[in-house]
Amino acid sequence: MFGVTKDFIGKPAPANYVAGLGRGATGFTTRSDIGPAREASADFPVGDLKPKTDGDDDEGQYQDPDNEVGLFSAAPYEEDDEEADRVWDMIDARMDERRKARREAREQEELAKFRQERPKISQQFSDLKRQLSTLDEAEWAAIPEVGDLVGKSRKKSKVPERFTPLPDTVLAATRDQAQYSTTTANTDEDNSGMLTDFKEIGQARDKVLGLKLDQASTDSASGQTTIDPKGYLTDLNSVALKTATEIGDIKKARLLLNSVITTNPKHAPGWIAAARLEEAAGRPVHARNTIAKGCLQCPKNEDVWLESARLNTLDNAKIILADAVRAIPQSVKIWLRAVNLESDSKNKKKVLRRALEFIPNSVKLWRTAINMEDNPDDAKVLLSRAVELVPLSVELWLALARLETYANAKKVLNKALGVIPTSHEIWIAAARLQEEQGEKGTVEKLIANAVAKLTKVGAVMSRDQWLKEAEKAESNGSVLTCQAIVKVTIGLGLDEEDEEDLESIWMDDAEASTNSGSIETARAIYAHALKSFPGHKLIWQQAAFLEKNHGSPESLEELLKRAVKYCPQSEVLWLMGAKEKWMTGDVDGARMILKEAFEANPNSEQIWLAAVKVESENQEYDRARRLLENARKQSGTERVWMKSVMLERQMGDYDQCKALLEQGLALYPTFDKLWMIKGQVENLDLNNPSSARETYNKAVKRCPKSVPLWIQLAQLEEKMDMVTKARNTLEKARFSNPKVPELWVEAIRIENRASNTAAAKVVAAKALQECPSSGAVWTEAIFMEPRPQRKARSVDALKKCEHDPIIVTTVARLFWNDRKIEKARNWFQKAVQIDPDQGDSFAWWYKFELQHGVEEQQDLVIKRCVQAEPHHGERWQAISKNVKNIGMKPDAVLKLCAMSLDL
């Protein structure tokens, strides 16, 4: 059976045969094949491949899915299909409507972008066409005709041009023709056959013109000149030559205004504008004519008449205003202008009386008439008549009361209150009248009655309004009235039970009055606040500062005596009293105050140190030592130990100084100032830098956050030729104290002192990244730049730290170097205003005034420095804290500091 050979073995497979097709096989691809094993056909499709016919492939590929052809092409179109299509159409329309605004906006944006990229030809020449409106007829006629431009596009012949020189005879003939001739040709001969000489005609014309000028410049009667050559030249300089653009604008404005006054002739502002346009165009006659027409068209408008009077001469203006008062007799402005036009006082009074006949209730006219009266009796008569005709004018009642005697003034004011019961000005005037007569007890009663009566009639005033009236009374010299107003009205509308709010509000009121220059008002507010809250030390301090700045030493002393009675525990008040005594040279008085302060505050550090300062600066060193010894036993604070050490160092007793340092550091090992003093004593006084370096190394371990300790250690190492160690020290310091400008400034300076400019710039760049708002860092960066680039660098610095006094002082120094004296002075003033406690700014300013200022300007710097009493500043502290300069006054420190500065 198996040996029989099948007849299909070795024969080719039938057409379109696919192995396993009956079992669902569709052919496969092997590694050696590319493409399917069998080519698909219509009879035996491979997979899901659709049988293809000619032409069907392309048509089905791009067929619209909305056109139902194919599977459902033969299905009937029923009513439900129509309903479905209608619903879908409605949905499509609704969706299209929702997107319509967005789509139209996008289309408009695309169209605008397209027009911007490819504008129309008409848009490209729109600006040129707009300029055609300014052309007049002559310019239109001067436009040349369009010629034949076709030949310009033709190619020029490449044949080179030939040049043939002309003979000399032709050149000579041309030269003779080009010469000027003083006679005309034969065709210009006159009837007599004579030739016209234009040269002589020109000379004769110049001679005649000179004679006319001589006649004009010389008076035939006196023989003196009537023309001022300098004034004539000045007038020529004042002539404004208008450009073509300005002339065009004037023409346009004239057309517009002509249209306005033609279409609406009763519009007065149009006539005024047209007249002013002609005046600006240099046509005064046209301006007067225009405004005259305006007066005819708008006879009831006072502005037109006033403008006409302004444009005309004095005599014509009087005539115009006379017509104006006939047309508008109730116009106060026209009557006052007519008064101003009169030069004689008698005529002015006549015009005013005539005006008052027409307008008897005008306060302006009555005021003007009264001011023109030199005799007080005549003024009284006018005022008596004025208050009868204008009874509601408070100003006229007060003016009449000022001119009357005391008894009559009281009657006038009482009568005025009867007519105008809601006027607070009359009540205040009555109080001032009582103050002038010395009736001090009635002033406060009047103000209290005023507040009650005004409240009763409904004319209630707020507390702020009464304070404004108090300031006004102070400016008029009525101090008692001012104080009475403050006392009666300071608590209006406030809750008296809330003490904190009352204190805050009254302090703000006093500060506002002080800033506005109303010292008596502020003093009255403080007095009332202290009477209400006598135990509040903050109010006493502010009142004391007010007296110190604006009062007398006696008033300050009296206030401080009262203050320490009510607030004996306030150390500041005791110290202020002692300092005032000491500043005036009364050392015994200062000692007495401090003694009383000790009794009230036995363990007060500030009072101990103030007493020590008084004794040491008066060279009473033994008493100062005893005070400090007692202070160490009773108080024993860090500052007491520091002052004890500083006193011994000042006296030169270094053994006792070192002993006190050891005791103090044992008690306060983290107090950096004791470590600094010890290092300075070992380095500067005992000349032992190695021991000082060891001290500083111990100090920075105990006080790693103390920036001055790190800086002093780095400076000592640099002084000992250990620059690398100094760099490492500052790097450690910056690691412990990031973003501290002083450490970066010292690092920059170390590199500069080592002549390592490149490294200094690198450090400065890092410093500006760490501390972009530090004026000290910016100053170092600015002065490392070349001179031409410092200005631009300073602009960058001001953007980062505009209100830093150090950078403002640096900018002033740059102006100083550029010899811009006034700018430098202004910037120095700005620097000391920003921070008066910065002593370096005063020192630089004083050094500047020593070179470029006068003695008064130098004294001004010293005065402001003494008032400010600065305590900070790198150079300032180096001078003021020097042991040799302890106790030195601010003016002396200022001079030494200025001498130590170097541009």
Image: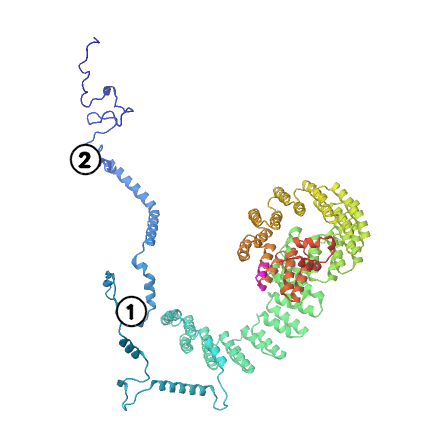
| Image x and y of residue 309, in percent | 46, 77
Mark nearest the camera among 1 and 2 is 1
Secondary structure beneath dot 2 equals: loop
Q: Which residues are magenta?
A: 813-822
> Which dot marks residue 143?
1
Q: Quick one: which residue is furthest to the top in this view?
A: 1
| Image x and y of residue 793, in percent | 54, 54
Q: Quadrant of residue 443?
A: bottom right
Membership of 482 in magenta stretch:
no
Q: Say few, some or many: other residues with alpha carbon within 10 Å of mark 1 (under 14 / 14 to 19 / 20 or more).
A: few
Amino acid on which the number 1 mark rests in the picture = Ile
Amino acid on which the number 2 mark rests in the picture = Gly
Question: Could you tell me which quadrant the C terminus lies in?
Answer: bottom right
The image shows residue 872, relative to residue 283, as above or below, that is above
| Image x and y of residue 808, in percent | 59, 57
| Residue holding disc 2 | 55
Q: Out of 344 and 532, give the one closest to the viewer.
A: 344
Q: Report if residue 28 is visible in the image.
A: yes
